[in-house]
Amino acid sequence: MNFDNLKDLWQQQSAPKPDIEALHHTAGKFKKTATIKMLLCIIALIFTAAFIIGVWIRFQPQLITTKIGLVLILLAILLFVVASTQSIGMFRAVNMAETNTEYIDHWMAVKQQQKKMQTLILSLYFILLSAGLALYMYEYAVKMSFSGALLAYGLTGAWILFNWFYVRPRHIKKQNSKLDEIIDGYRKVMEQLGEDTLKG
């Protein structure tokens, strides 16, 4: 995408306009920050998966429920890592746009991928993780007192619910707000430059 050409055309407009350089800066900063966060998340999940496999090998759980639980947790991690890798690919594709319209189309694709992450992927992740933890904990919970097992399951459930109902919505709202700001800003630029209607 020829940003210099876009900037020159934008500066020729007589109508009041937002700062195109600030818009480019906001978009670049968001892309960089989101990519770094996803990479760190992927690294953390890979280390977590390695730790889980190590625990499995070291302690050799006896019950099939424990083994199924570990498999479900690993599947949840794999699902999230694959989806996050796809999201990083979408962010990288933004720089490969050849035209102004393609540039915004790439941002729209990023938004669609993020929507998929926020709904389908996160839902499956939490379902698999919750079921996996519940099954994994059973072998050890049966050896505890009733109050101990109740406390263990209660704390685990509270942690999952806190992340689902508090952390997740706040993260989604913040991310969507920034994406909408970027896309709407570029839409206004394209409209004033007489570009084609955006796809999607």
Image (spheres, grey):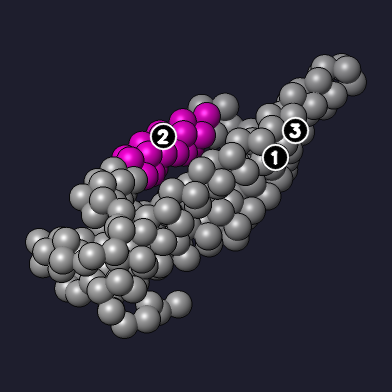
Where is mark 1, residue-wise? 165
Which residue is drawn at the image coordinates 51% and 34% (left, top)?
52
Where is mark 3, residue-wise? 157
Cβ atoms under marks 3 and 2 closer than 8 Å = no
| Rendered location of residue 12, percent (x, y) | 16, 66
Q: CA distance from mark 3 to mark 2?
A: 22 Å
| Up/down of 174 relative to 111, above or below | above
| Rendered location of residue 112, percent (x, y) | 47, 65
Sequence-wise, the earlier of marks 1 and 2 is 2
Q: Quadrant of residue 120?
A: bottom right
Where is mark 2, residue-wise? 44
Which residues are drawn in magenta? 33-55
Q: CA distance from mark 1 to mark 3?
A: 12 Å
The residue lying furthest to the front in this view is 14
On screen, residue 128 versus residue 38, left or right, reads right
Q: CA distance from mark 1 to mark 2?
A: 22 Å
Answer whether residue 44 is magenta in the image: yes
Look at the magenta stretch and give its main secondary structure: helix
| Up/down of 90 relative to 160, above or below | below
| Secondary structure beneath label 1 | helix
